[in-house]
Amino acid sequence: MFPFKRVLVALDLTEMDETLIAYTAYLNTIFDIEKLYFVHVAKSLELPERLLEKYPKLRAPADETIEGIIREKVDKQYKNNKKVEIKIEVREGNAEDRIMRLSDIKEVDLIVMGRKHNLKGSGMLPNRIARIGHCSLLTVPEKTDIKINKIMVPVDFSKNSQFAVEQGKIIAEKTKAELVIQNTYAVPSGYHTIGKSYEEFAQIMKEHAQEDAQKFIKDCGISEGKLSILLSLDDDNEPSNKIHAEAIKHKADLIIIASRGRTGLANILLGSVADKILQLKNQVPVLVVKNKKHNLGFLEALLRL
């Protein structure tokens, strides 16, 4: 598990900002964050001359005005916090490019972004950042309760899943939250050829998943008493929908999932399940964990080719 010492929070000057700033303040009590970058990217910081003539007070530099607005919001949460260094960055241009560049320059460990449902905005930027970003990403739905009492970690019993479980274990220990290891299993299409009903083969697959889960937990070095196992039958071939439904049903406050892939490139580009979970209108914060050092090392190797 890599610590989240440097965190970038993407703001857009909507109501979403208050939720993100408050949630990040809560995260600071968990991760002991050293540097916080609150970033707003505007398509353009220039105003039309005719508008400036009508409203001369707007002639003050736009970036300074925006920085002041953000500073006022941030101070409400961090007024008495002297341990974390706070930087406010206002940039102009393409949001995706600017956020990616800043996250690399500042050597960010975690990017925090809002997940909108009713507020204005397409909500697609977090998905794009998740696919190409080198560091972990946390998406926070609008009006999220600032708490972590139950953490759900979807796993496929791979090494990457162990990375996500390790992250979940650390957060659970610091928040006293319940840790739930969730696996989605499915019935293979040719089950009827061996004379078994769907229900019978579903039970067989569940038993195998249970055995795999026991071995996986042992490999992770976690005692069963510190977590619970949730096995879910995927009956519609959409594991992402099942994961989200289980998180809602069991009242999880955080979903932690690892980007999949055995190579650095696959790890950077994210996995299909993680990608689809981020595309859903999630009601639960989702933390996609990535091995930042592995990803950056792989990219450096590519550039030398």
Image (cartoon, grey):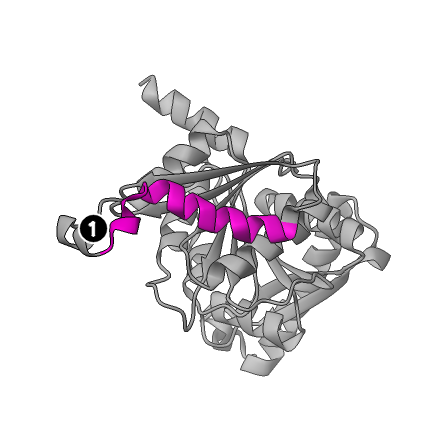
Label 1 crowd (10 A; few <14 / some 14-19 / many >=20): some
Image spot of residue 93 (x, y percent)? 27, 42
User: Going by the image, does 94 lie left or right of 88?
Assistant: left
Is 189 covered by the magenta stretch?
no
Element type where label 1 sits in the image: helix
Figure check: 273 above or below 190: above
Which residue position holds label 1? 52
What residue is at 40 percent from the left and 21 percent from the top? 301
- Split into 4 quadrants, where in the image is the N terminus? top right
Image height of 201 relative to 19, above or below: below
**Amino acid type indicated by mark 1:** Leu
Left or right relative to 48: residue 137 = right
Q: Main secondary structure of the magenta part?
A: helix
Rendering coords of residue 70 (x, y %)? 48, 49
Q: Is residue 256 visible?
A: no
Q: As rendered, which of 283 and 185 lies closer to the eye? A: 283
The magenta stretch spans which residues?
55-77
Q: Nearer the viewer, residue 159 or 178?
A: 178
Indicate the position of residue 9 as horizontal and vertical percent values.
50, 46
Quadrant of the image for the C terminus? top left
Asked if residue 232 shows in the view, the reply is yes
Taking 248 as reference, is 240 left or right? left
